[in-house]
Amino acid sequence: MKHYFNPMSRGVTTDWMLKELDAPHEQIIVDFTSDENNLPDFRKINPMGKLPVLVDNGIVVTEVAAICAYLADKFPEKGLAPAIGSIDRAAYYRYLFIAGNTIEPAFSLATSGLEHPDPRSAGWGDMPRVLATVEALTPETGWALGEKFTAADVVFGGLLDFSMIFNWIDASPKVAAYVARIRQRPAYRETHGAFIEMIGEK
Ligand SMILES: N[C@@H](CCC(=O)N[C@@H](CS)C(=O)NCC(=O)O)C(=O)O
């Protein structure tokens, strides 16, 4: 597997997922700040020009949540996804999809200072609705699906962590405590060195 990423991009989340799984892969660093990105033909792999990208046996997977879900299913023995058909799969999908579809667009729009469109027609609603949902979905203790850490935590918790690092949100005590638990994971710490340094956490 080839993992195209940059340690200062959202690719840290998929890097973290790979580390949680101890999945063998080749790391390819891409400079996402250059106009066409810095690798020849990178846009042929991902026309969005975005990181992260996973290529497995010639199959391209993009989008943080899709990559994490794909990896969790590829290594079922690692237990980072509930079994297909199990009841936990419902909540699992919800965490995976809501992160990129709903939470991130709302946070990004709010941070850019742009006005939100009508929340009834915008798929991401508005900040009050999203923050209420984040609060409701954040576990008081343990992890998104209960006692077992899963890819739902990598995606949902990873986005909350990213949002706190970049001051997109003023985290509630419950969200801050969940993110603090996330930050204690050895695989998180191994892959987030640049961010840990940035926020001054030891
Ligand atoms: N929806 C994408 C977002 C990825 C994304 O925005 N990546 C940024 C870096 S954090 C990027 O590659 N930007 C370079 C560009 O857009 O040219 C995902 O979940 O993977």
Image (tube, rainbow, N blue to C red):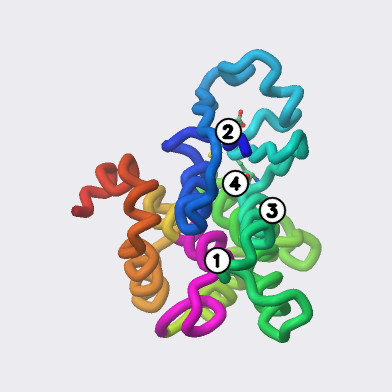
Disc 2 from disc 3: Cα separation: 14 Å
- Can you tell which of label 4 and label 3 is closer to the viewer? 3
The residue that appears at 67% across and 82% down in the rendered structure is 88
Disc marking residue 78: 1
Q: Split into 4 quadrants, where in the image is the N terminus? A: top right
Q: Name the residue under label 2.
A: 4
The residue that appears at 71% across and 23% down in the rendered structure is 43
* Amino acid type of the residue that numbered disc 1 sits on in the rendered structure: Lys
Q: Mark 4 points at which residue?
A: 114
| Lower position in the chain sequence, tag 4 or tag 1 | 1
* Amino acid type of the residue that numbered disc 3 sits on in the rendered structure: Ala
Q: Give the range drawn in magenta.
A: 141-160
* Amino acid type of the residue that numbered disc 2 sits on in the rendered structure: Tyr
Horizontal and vertical percent position of residue 171: 39, 67
Disc marking residue 52: none
Disc 2 from disc 4: Cα separation: 31 Å
Q: In this view, does 23 lie to the left or right of 174?
A: right
The residue that appears at 35% across and 63% down in the rendered structure is 185
Check if mark 3's residue and mark 1's residue have beta carbons within 8 Å: no
Disc marking residue 66: 3
